[in-house]
Image (spheres, helix red, strand yellow):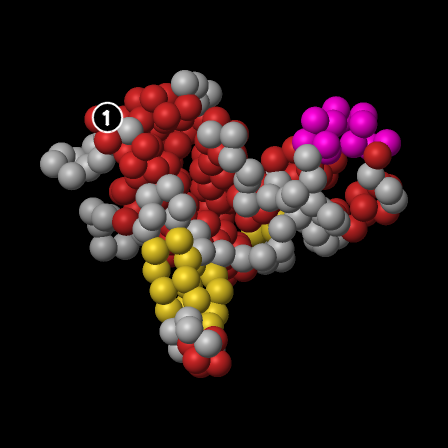
Amino acid sequence: MTTRLQLGPDAVAEVEQFIFAMVKWGEHDHTVPRSWSFEQMRASIPGYVQLLEEVRQGRPVKHFENLVGATWHTEGSVGAAGGISVRNPVTREERTLTGDGVIDWSSYVATFETAVAAWYRSIERQSLAELRSALRDGIASVEGFINQRAAEWSTAHPEDELTEKHRFVPFRTKLDSWCQKMTGNRMEPENMERLLHIKQRRDAAVHPKHSVSAVSLEELADLLNEFTFAIAVPFFDLHRMFSFAVPAIILRAAYAPIVNVE
């Protein structure tokens, strides 16, 4: 009998904890639910039992999950009306597009979307190459998030800029020193070490020393689960450090079902 990579039976792991995370940290406009306790959430969401089953089957967390992706497509008629612009109100960086095209309203989120898509393709195709893409874009997204926060910090604090203008800044320094300066907090040591470890694996995968690669399905499953626990979970933690709402794509990746070999 042929063995294959398989995802756990539910669309997300720890369904209730996932819903709670979406209520507390998701991109939505409801203020009061963010202060709910776990029990208050259970008692306050109408049709909670039905919602549990819907989320278990892969449907969104009704009322709390933002389904709008990071990439928008424009058409000629939009350009005729003057175009569409995306602007960072802090750094004043702006991009305008007229006519047919594509705009990423959040570059780091768009990059993470490509990472998650590659993660799923790696499972479907049992592909090490797709996993490399997931690791590459996952780490790039984390670094992009930090760089964006640093650009905003530098605009507000020109006397204390956080930039790479004159020297390369290691990923560890950005995770630790930069983020602590910007938030006053430090990342959970375990999460930081996981991110640093997976970045080393990413770097080795992106710049392989050998012409061929070979991993067992068990090893591939372990690496796929590392994407969840060493990239997505710390990324969720990083958003909370900055008191930022967490995009649904990151929350779903942090609560992704476990990959097994069956």
Looking at the image, which is closer to me, 224 or 104?
A: 104
Q: Which residue extends farthest front?
A: 82
Quarter of the image holding residue 48? top right
Q: Which residue extends farthest left?
A: 166
User: Residue 40: horizontal and vertical position, in percent?
Assistant: 81, 27
Name the residue: 75% across, 49% down. Answer: 62
Q: Secondary structure at mark 1?
A: helix
Which amino acid is tagged 1?
Asp
The residue range painted magenta reads 32-43
Residue that mark 1 sits on? 160
Name the residue: 37% across, 21% down. Answer: 180
Looking at the image, which is closer to me, 206 or 168?
A: 168
- Specify whether 140 is left or right of 24: left
The reply to whether the magenta stretch includes residue 49 is no
Q: Residues within 10 Å of mark 1 (few under 14, many from 20)?
A: few
Is residue 229 among what the camera can see?
A: no
Name the residue: 28% across, 34% down. Answer: 154
Is residue 32 among what the camera can see?
A: yes
The reply to whether the magenta stretch includes residue 35 is yes
User: Residue 175: horizontal and vertical position, in percent?
Assistant: 34, 28
